[in-house]
Amino acid sequence: MLPKKTLLATAVIGAMLATAANAETLRWTRSADSLTMDPHSQNEGPTHSVNHQIFDTLIYQDMDVAYQPGLATEWYVKEDEPTVWVFKIREGVTFHEGQSLTADDVAFSIDRARREPADMRGLLTSISEVRAVDDYTVEVETHEPNPLLPNNFTNLFIMSREWAEEHGVEEAQNYAAGEETYAVRNANGTGPFRVESREPDVRTVFVRNDDYWGIDHYPMEISRLVFTPIESASTRVAALLSGEVDFLQETPVQDIERLANADGIKNEQGAENRTIFLGMDMGSAQLRTADTDDNPFADRRVREAINLAVDATTIQRAVMRGNSQPAGMIAPPFVNGYSEEMDEVLEADTARAQELMEEAGYGDGFRVTLHCPNDRYVNDEQICQAVVSMLARIGITVDLVAQTRSLHFAELARGEYDFYLLGWGVPTMDSEYIFNYLYHTKEENHGTWNFTGFSDERVDELTVAMGQEVDEEARNEMIAEAWQIVHDEIVYIPIHHQMLTWSMRDDIDFKVQSENTPHFKYLRFN
Amino acid sequence: MSQDVQTRDSAVPVVPPKPSKLRTFLDSDIVYSWKRQPVVILATLVTLTMFAAALFAPWIAPQNPFDPRQLELIDAFTPPMTTSDFTGNYYLLGSDSQGRDVFSAILYGSRISLLVGFAAVIFALVMGTALGLLAGFRGGWRDALIMRIADVQLTFPSILMALLIFGVIRGFLPRSMHAEVAIIVLIIAIGLSDWVQYARAVRGATMVEKSKEYVQAARVIGLPARKILFQHILPNVMRPVLVIGTIGLALAIIAEATLSFLGVGMPATQPSLGTLIRVGQDYMFSGEWWILLFPGMALLMLALSVNLLGDWLRDVLNPKLR
Amino acid sequence: MLAFLIQRVLQAIFVMFVVALISFSLFHYVGDPVLNMLGQEATEADRAALRAQLGLDQPVVVQFWNFIVNAAQFEFGISYRSARPVTDLILERLPATLELAIISAIFAVVMGILLGIYTALRRRSWLANFIMTASLIGVSLPTFLIGVLLIYIFAVELGMLPAFGRGETVRIGDWWTTGLLTTSGLRSLILPAITLGLFQLTLIMRLVRAEMLEVLSTDYIKFARARGLSKRVVHLRHALKNTMIPVITIIGLQLGTIIAFAIITETVFQWPGVGALFITAVRFVDVPVMAAYLMMIALVFVVINLVVDLLYYAVDPRLRAQGGGK
């Protein structure tokens, strides 16, 4: 899938136009702050967004989510050794505090990230050993051949071993145990910006790193970047309207039009690599919150009825105001294995759904609790409320519990939910990631986010096989087969692929990135 | 403190021919004062209208906003005084993001606001009066204990107290129950945060009454304590209690709205006025002003008119208690 | 004197004990800290280890004792959410809240006294009547609605003032940050200070008015007038002075209320103070922060009340007489 790559021309194009001497400030806001500056402690979107400004990764996804060389200039599978990936490290790179980057720092960082207590370790379980072969070559050995290994490195930040040892942060911060280390509030990366000051949840100020290795390759027009998280949606919009911020990440859908019509402000929109869907516990003998003594979700007809009752098209029109793409499968179009045919949206049919409920013996309906986050996805609580009305029409009385994301995910993880809303992004751009987390039977290292109780031997087999199959065609066949099985079983109720809107001052030239990770080194002022 | 009014009241029936009770009431200085103040008349009318609207909401409202089956998502964000193109429903004050009729939502929302307000006030009133009577009448360690607790609680503003009690009660309940019991928890939290004022007033009044001759006499002739309390003392301490209660109602309504606004009160599926405002705030810039404006005005009118009435009642009944 | 003092101090300690008990119950019963802190992949052994590390395996009484000992040293552990010591978080946020509270208190006091005097002296004028009616609206409007309205008018429609935050701040000393020294800081302060101060303003105004009216009708003032002193002198020197004692008491007590209401104002304006920290903590069930906030607020209130009580004692001779001399 990812053949040998060399330094790409795209990175060089900007070189001639670089206007690095500009003194431009960009004030950036979004709803949530980064949790920590320790680069390996948390695998979380807003945290990565901040760290991408300070640190570099070996490989990163640019604004078009194409894989680009970062600190690695090329990478390939070693000849005759299919379990070894070779990474050539960029020469002449220095950290903000002056240390030179070597292969040793890279090996150290990967090891740090794949050890407890780093949260990033979940993406790196296939690695068995990391070696610095010489100053600028790193070899990564995996247990089995892993064709997709480099895709797992796009949020793997490289830090300095010398710095880490000097400050006693050789291990990642143990976030869960509430550890406070030097690395939580201080960062020494090789990235395009240095941190000037940081008040968590209030303000973080970055200044341009004029010694950046890519200073001539990227526009690098921002000299000072001020990040202010604002929790309330309307306050965020007010701040942009009144000119207190220049760039708003994640514009609330209801304000898109107003911002589009406002003087001096424009929107950039695009599809996000994330699908929103409902999950049901179909495995338990009896539901926890239902008023039945069996499990209605175990009956495929009930799941089909729900699928027919949930009207994704109306949700798109009314709740999302058109800013979503109704879905028929839970893989976004970016993902290898996506099929337009399977993503076709089911037409809502309440009458047919009611019939199915009767056939299944639930003609009088039943009662169940739906759990929903209220601050994670675009209009998540609103979507759930709409689902409540829609299911009420086929006799299912839904009690809605909408709460903050940390509670939602913690309880979900404990397997306490019968019925829940979830959104899933696919940073590796491949279906294997979805099957591995969401469809595989729940085990220690597989199916860790499969709370449906769905378990299918063939799907498990295919999931493991697609992680190791090197032949692309055979692999894609496996993926297609697996999708067909789960599609027929109606394991999840797809709602939509999320769309992203970023709003900004209209003299800013910056397109939406579908991972929702802005790389400000690309931003230009007109 | 209230003797002058009392003597006047008792003086009226002496005059022959014996007037009806209604006549007595209409001639009283309460009515006189009421008739002279247009603002108070207006406040009364608004209050009564809103009470009636809330009470008869199921018959007036075109939609039951708490019944998910009746919400037409497709009609979301219909502007005020518009008939929907999709369903043909008419939305007098527009509809919100779920296709909820804002007019109906306000009626049902005020119902909750008033229900929580009244219930919390009654809760506080009964509890405060009972404890106040006990403290004032019996004295001793009971008095000391009750008044110490009251002092402690008075240390904190009632909104903080309510937030706290609310948080603690909810912490002990499983989350799936929160929506179902939200109203009860709100009532208890707000009521519990507000009993002290009643207890203090009643205790004071009780101690004054207790030392009066008629109570002493009743004691001497051996009337049981319960009888003295309920027949003699209670009627005489009710006046300040009612005044505090009227003002307390407005405060309780605001407290409920504030808790709901902070996202810890009524859930979005059973919105009270505060919840509607919280939700409506998100549409402040998007042009759907009616989602925020109308519930905001309803809350303002309700709180303002109840406050005005309370203020006036306090002045009339109890000129000293300011 | 001593008995009174001891009684008050004991009461203060009792309050703190009760609040500590509540805070501790929060710790103990609201949410499971271990499940909150460990991810879904944690094993039962991990959980047991963390439980032991946090001391959650000890008897409840021991845990409560540890909690009190730690609290007495301002040690509330680590925030579940930001993984930083709670004491640091609160100290970081405290200047913002205190600045907001003090500025809005000053606003409320100055405006409240001025309007109170005006409405008392010009009782019959239409402006005084208007102010009195408007003040009722001020009392009836919930704080959050005032904030939302001000943002809508001044930040969105007119674009005159900032809608959120503190603007640029300047660091003074080790941990104090101030927004009072920069233009953007001062501009940011206006709307939140008005929102927070409005309720107290109406309260003070009505109190000053009532006290003024009462004092103006006393013989003392009538006598002063009869002596031929100018109106201005009578009003300001004699009448106002006598109204100030109850007003000052109320202001002292209201300072605590301002800090409590700051929760709402800070939420509306995204003001980075301890109130906003508290609400975020409530939403995230960040129990250490909640507990610390409760203890802090309780301490503030207890201290204010204690001081007020003692001042009363110093001022009111009757109380002293009861105490039985020295």
Image (cartoon, coloured by chain):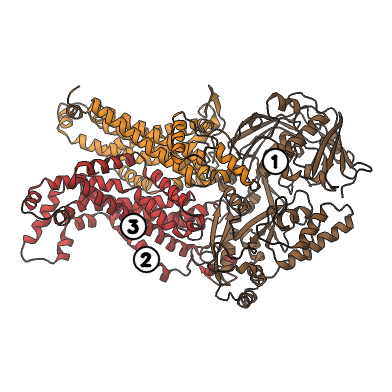
Chain colours: A brown, B red, C orange
The answer as to whether the residues below labels 1 and 2 share one chain is no
| Residue corresponding to mark 1 | A48
Crowding near pointer 1: few (<14 within 10 Å), some, many (20+)?
Answer: many
Residue at (83% x, 60% y) in the render:
A478
Q: Quadrant of residue A28?
A: top right
- Asked whether disc 1 touches disc 2, contact meaning CB atoms under 8 Å apart, the reply is no
| Residue corresponding to mark 2 | B55
- Please give the label number shown on residue A153: none
Where's residue C209, x and y in %? 27, 38
Is A94 situated left or right of A451 in this image?
right
Looking at the rendered image, the disc whose residue lies closer to the viewer, 2 or 3, is: 3
Secondary-structure class at tag 2? helix
Query: Where is C6 relative to B6, above or below?
Result: above
Q: Nearer the viewer, residue B189 or B91?
A: B189
- Please give the label number shown on residue B118: 3
Q: Quadrant of the C terminus of chain B?
A: top left
Where's residue C186, x and y in %? 51, 31
